[in-house]
Amino acid sequence: MENLLNVSPGLIIWTLLNFLIFLGIIGKFGFKPLLASLKARQEGISNAISEADRINAEARTILKENQDKMTSAQQEMMNLIKEGKHQADALIQAAHEETERVKRVKMTEAIREIEREKEAALQSLRAETASLVVQATAKVLGSTMNADSHRALIESYIDEVSKN
């Protein structure tokens, strides 16, 4: 064990010579493939980072476009809803106006019909009254007058009374 701790110049020279030969062999055969492998790995990592940056930028662009499209779609939806409400309000207003118009027409027709019925009833009443008066007068007087002249006289009195 003592020999191992002693410094021997021959052993140092052989160790240095072996080390230099080892470095030469590694330098000749090992460094170039190692450096090529490291360089290829560095380029691969660099390319992956560049590709990731490109994809990230593309994703941001797509996200921005999608957000713009969504905003546009929401705005369009709001416009459609607003337009639909306006159309619904317009339809409701038109229906209300049409209902009011129909109501006025029906009311006017009903009033006219009532007036016609009233006139018909008054004419019928006048004719019946005139006929009854002629019959009553004939019974009272005991003789029949000319019915047409008597009817005309009675109708003129009835018209005069109904106007007052």
Image: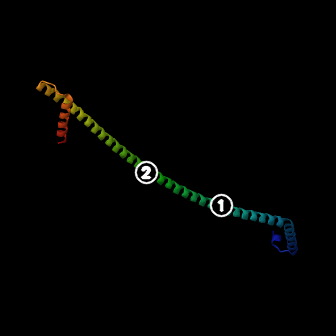
Of residues 3 and 97, the one nearer the viewer is 97
Q: Amino acid at mark 2?
A: Ala
Residue 129 visible in this rendered orientation of the protein: no
Percent from the top left, x then y, of residue 59? Answer: 63, 59
Q: Amino acid at mark 1?
A: Glu
Q: Quadrant of residue 112?
A: top left
Percent from the top left, x then y, of residue 42? Answer: 75, 65
Percent from the top left, x then y, of residue 67? Answer: 57, 59
| Left-right relation of 148 to 75 | left
The number of discs equals 2
Percent from the top left, x then y, of residue 115? Answer: 27, 39
Residue 96 numbered mark, or none: none
User: Which quarter of the rendering shows the C terminus?
Assistant: top left
Q: Quadrant of residue 151?
A: top left
Rendering colour mode: rainbow
Tag 2's secondary structure? Answer: helix
Q: Residue at x 26, y 34 (%)?
A: 120
Tag 1's secondary structure? Answer: helix
| Left-right relation of 112 to 89 | left
Q: Which residue is mark 2?
A: 90
Q: Residue at x 35, y 43 (%)?
A: 105
Of residues 128 and 103, the one nearer the viewer is 128
Q: Which residue is mark 1?
A: 58
Q: Residues within 10 Å of mark 2 (few under 14, many from 20)?
A: few
Q: Is residue 130 above or below residue 74?
A: above
Of residues 70 and 7, the one nearer the viewer is 70
Q: Nearer the viewer, mark 2 or mark 1?
A: 2
Q: Residue at x 52, y 57 (%)?
A: 75
Q: Is residue 8 above or below residue 76?
A: below
- Gap in angstroms between the C-alphas marked 2 and 1: 47 Å
User: Which quarter of the rendering shows the N terminus?
Assistant: bottom right
